[in-house]
Image: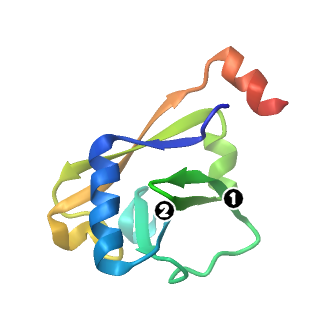
């Protein structure tokens, strides 16, 4: 099965740290505005999802969403959520940890694209 979103070990470790501090979490891939295009981490339910938000999958037992308009551009890629040093989006929970989540991506192979479409 092809996963639309995966996480590095470093990202999974940070997710566990944040879950221990804040409880259940959720992610939403920011589409721009004040935080750029970053994966934003919130306490579960703090961001109100709309009918245009697409569930891409889960990382670290945490659901990951993206707005449909942005998804239309990214649907042929796998999102790889990673962590780097530095402060990220001011609304994302990891900022106070001196780390920030970062989205990397790779294009799906032709075979993976076939699997997704079936």
Q: Please give left or right for residue 46 compared with residue 101 in the image.
A: right
For mark 2, what is the residue? 30
Quadrant in which residue 19 is drawn = bottom left
Name the residue rendered at 30%, 73% in the picture.
Answer: 20
Q: Residues within 10 Å of mark 1 (few under 14, many from 20)?
A: some
Q: Is residue 98 above or below residue 42?
A: above
Q: Please give left or right for residue 28 compared with residue 104 in the image.
A: right
Name the residue rendered at 85%, 30% in the picture.
Answer: 118
What kind of element bears circle 1?
Answer: strand
Q: Please give left or right for residue 17 compared with residue 47 in the image.
A: left
Give the x, y percent position of residue 8. Answer: 35, 41
Q: Is residue 58 above or below residue 93?
A: above
Q: From this viewpoint, which residue is outermost toward the right?
A: 118
Check contact, mark 2 vs mark 1: CB within 8 A.
no
Name the residue rendered at 27%, 65% in the picture.
Answer: 17
Q: Which mark is residue 110?
A: none
For mark 1, what is the residue? 54
Give the x, y percent position of residue 70. Answer: 62, 53
Whichever of labels 2 and 1 marks the residue nearer the N terminus, that label is 2
Give the x, y percent position of residue 40. Answer: 42, 65
Give the x, y percent position of residue 103. Answer: 40, 46
What kind of element bears circle 2?
Answer: loop
Name the residue rendered at 43%, 74% in the picture.
Answer: 42
The answer for how far apart the CA atoms under marks 2 and 1 are is 12 Å
């Amino acid at each position: 099965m092809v996963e639309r979103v995966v996480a590095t070990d470093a990202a999974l470790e940070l997710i566990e740290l944040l879950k221990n501090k804040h409880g259940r979490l959720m992610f939403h891939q920011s589409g721009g505005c004040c935080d750029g295009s970053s994966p934003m981490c919130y306490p579960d339910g703090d961001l109100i999802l709309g009918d245009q938000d697409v569930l891409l999958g889960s990382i670290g037992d945490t659901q990951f969403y993206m707005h449909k308009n942005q998804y239309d551009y990214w649907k042929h890629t796998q999102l790889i959520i990673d962590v780097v040093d530095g402060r990220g989006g001011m609304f994302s929970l990891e900022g106070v940890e001196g780390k920030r989540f970062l989205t990397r991506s790779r294009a799906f192979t032709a075979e993976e694209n076939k699997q997704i479409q079936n």
